Amino acid sequence: MKRRPIEAIGTGTARCLDCRLRHLTLFADLEPGDFNLINLPIDEIDCEAGSVLYSAGGEATAIFTIRVGLVKLVQYLPDGTQRIVRLLGPGATAGLEVIVNQPYGHSAIALQPSSLCRIPRPVIERLCRETPRLQGQLMRRWHAALHEADGRLTELSTGKALQRLARLLLHLAQADGTAVLFSREDLGAMLGISREHASRAVAELRRHRAISEISMNRFRCDIARLEAIGIEDC
Amino acid sequence: MKRRPIEAIGTGTARCLDCRLRHLTLFADLEPGDFNLINLPIDEIDCEAGSVLYSAGGEATAIFTIRVGLVKLVQYLPDGTQRIVRLLGPGATAGLEVIVNQPYGHSAIALQPSSLCRIPRPVIERLCRETPRLQGQLMRRWHAALHEADGRLTELSTGKALQRLARLLLHLAQADGTAVLFSREDLGAMLGISREHASRAVAELRRHRAISEISMNRFRCDIARLEAIGIEDC
DNA sequence: CGGCTTCTTGAAGATATTCAAACCCAGTGG
DNA sequence: CCACTGGGTTTGAATATCTTCAAGAAGCCG
């Protein structure tokens, strides 16, 4: 995992200002002058699949904005089993705990090669204090995280494995009708089932012709069939 | 469900100021002057078990602080099955969606006779705008809600039914070692199992002498045994 | 080409659901 | 007072669903 600083103190604010993705991010509502409040460099990080951004229980020193890729937030049970609690895609924010002075509540691990911005805690704290224009986005991000958490519980932890997988695919499906899956281990950890059963469920959806594999872990989805299976399995 | 207004416009602020529970609530950090910003009456509501505070999808017109009792937040799946997403006890806040201008994401229903304060949306909006002292508590409440949501997923939706029930009881247990359960239907909706299986799980915990019923749905908990069962069932 | 990991599949056993019937208890009305 | 009723609970038995263990297949990398 390599870090490449994108700005030196006091000079690099233009990079945030010019960011093509800014309208998706935490900084969407900031005004040009607000960027002068950024008094520490914001690193832009590229990492490969499997990289650990931070670990559960560790002191929260920074908040992350995902630019490209996919990041999982994982919690572990005493017996060692893991559960994937949330998936974060481009524009999403990891590490909101920073704001309430709490240690990280999850481990954040990249599922795909990803690129992110690392915003040090003092920057967030200062922005919170000195501009009113961050609050709205923060609230929206808390709400989005909570909404996804609740959705995960009702949609991905309720019903039979086949239904859950169908619903997950509907979440993951892009506009073009394709979805990228990940390892069966992670699939299991998302749906609360064993890796073997995850494998069987994928095979069964294929048999139902609800999905078909285009390339390694890339699937074309038949949305209508997935929806049918998601509601009442056949 | 009867409503009893506790203050008229512009006069009732003393009630919030004097509230014995205020240190637990959203208004914990407000200073005396801030209460003058409250320009609409805050109703104090008493309701019986089963009362609906608001319904999923409805316009969010108010935020609620639970004073006494227990409230469930429920989501429904297209097929009609319900899932209890969160439990809210004294001091907790329901309806945070108000702040991001979103419709209610759940239905809020009292599980026990409860008493709550209903804070109209305009009051929250004005306080957000005109005092910086609400933000901190709001963030903390978002965080608490998210933390509970995540915990519910890892602890109450993972593993076998007996383990989940044991973990739930550990959450519900008071300082005196007793816990109040609710209907088997609701238990099932919390743990993601059928009511019949919930019933069997309760019976089995009793056979293990991990709990014993004191009175109708009031149990004495053997914390050590519950913890043992919660980790690896025997 | 090994050697490694991950995925897939089979089969046995564990766990949960469903349906049905019995039960308990509180409230009602004869 | 007691039988009756209706809701929730408990229990049993048959079935469906998932886990676990084990072995084979497929992909990846040196």
Image (spheres, coloured by chain):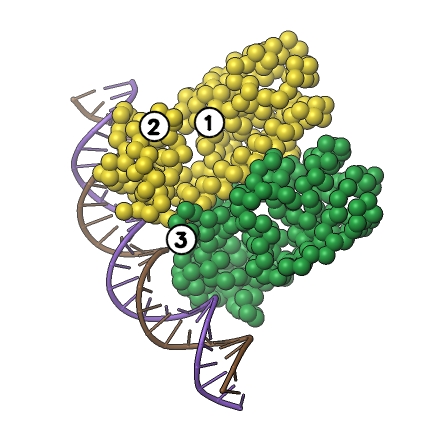
Chain colours: A yellow, B green, C brown, D purple
Tag 3, which secondary structure? loop
- Report whether mark 2 lies on the same chain as mark 3: no
Residue at the (70%, 39%) spot, across then down: B122
Give x and y (percent) for residue A47: 45, 20
Q: Nearer the viewer, mark 2 or mark 3?
A: 2
- Report whether mark 2 lies on the same chain as mark 1: yes
Q: Determine which quarter of the picture holds residue B34.
A: top right
For mark 1, name the chain: A
Tag 1, which secondary structure? loop
**Does B130 sit above or below residue B78?**
above
For mark 3, name the chain: B
Q: Which residue is mark 2?
A: A177
- Mark on residue B160? 3
Give x and y (percent) for residue B190: 48, 53
Residue at the (65%, 14%) spot, across then down: A32
- Report whether mark 1 lies on the same chain as mark 3: no
Residue at the (83%, 47%) spot, across then down: B11
Give x and y (percent) for residue C12: 21, 54
Q: Is residue A61 left or right of A167 when viewed as pictured? A: right
The numbered mark, 2 or 1, whose residue comes first in the sequence reads 1
Q: Which residue is mark 1?
A: A89
Q: Gap between marks 2 and 3, in whole Å? A: 35 Å
